[in-house]
Amino acid sequence: MATRKYTPSKRLTQVSERKQRVAAATAELHAEKGPVATSYADIAHRAGVSLPTVHSYFPTQAALMSACTGHVATGAPPLPVEKILAAPNLPAAAATLVVSMDALHAYFEPWLSWRAETAIPFVAQLRINNRDRLTTLLVQLLSRHRKGPQAAHAAAWESLLSFDLWQRLVRQHAMPRARARVLLIDVLLAALGPESAASGPSQS
């Protein structure tokens, strides 16, 4: 009986494939029942690997969450940063922002709805990092179109663009997403004062 040969490159490929299966299984389970209710045994069963294999690849919750969020992020619609910053005026920038954030919220909703940041430090830090990145972008954007410090207005825009507000409008209040987009564009501009709100029409 011939023995099978395992080259280092083949083994690395197999390990990589198994890690991807584990990350994908984790993402599926987190969407279905949330990360708090998902056990390593659940993940091993879904991925078709042994429990020790999952622990070996991802020995900490942070390592597992990092792989899971990385897997989920690969399918997310990108935020068109250059298009937002290149917008000719704030109404156009607000429209692009709202449409883009609506798409992102709809994509990430299966995972964000579980509010895992209250129990998992990695998720809490991830949301903080995402908020900080968006706020930094908003400061840069607003500073291109307005004079003076923009930190307060950027913080207001970040809050208005948050998943929590989007979900309240779309799910709790059953507002059609197209209507929610128009409303949010108007509210973003209104938060800057009458001149910004009047400088261009809303776009869905």
Image (cartoon, rainbow, N blue to C red):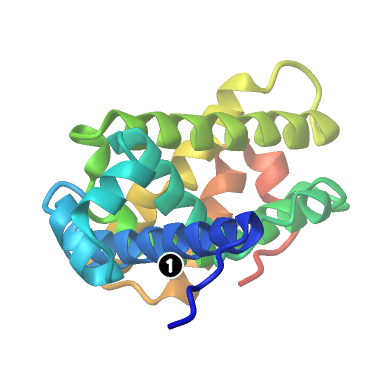
Taking 152 as reference, is 106 above or below it?
below
Residue 147: give x, y in percent of width and height: 81, 22
Q: Is residue 169 visible?
A: no
Residue 70 horizontal side relative to residue 165, left or right: right
- In this image, 77 relative to 177: left or right? right
- Is 194 left, or right, of 143 in this rendering? left
Q: Nearer the viewer, residue 123 or 88?
A: 123
Q: Quadrant of the C terminus?
A: bottom right
Residue 52 locus on image (x, y percent): 23, 49
Q: Tell me the kind of residue under disc 1.
A: Ala
Mark 1 closeness class: few <14, some 14–19, many ≥20 residues within 10 Å: some
The residue sitting at 71% across, 43% down in the picture is: 196
Is 158 placed above or below 50 here?
A: above
Residue 142, by quadrant, is top right
Looking at this view, is 111 or 135 the one in front? 111
Residue 11 seen in the current view: yes
Q: How many marks?
A: 1
* Coordinates of residue 154 in the picture (x, y in percent): 60, 30
Residue 131: percent from left, percent from top:
50, 34
Q: Residue drawn at (43%, 35%), measured in percent from left and top? A: 126
Q: Which residue is mark 1?
A: 106
Q: Secondary structure at mark 1?
A: helix
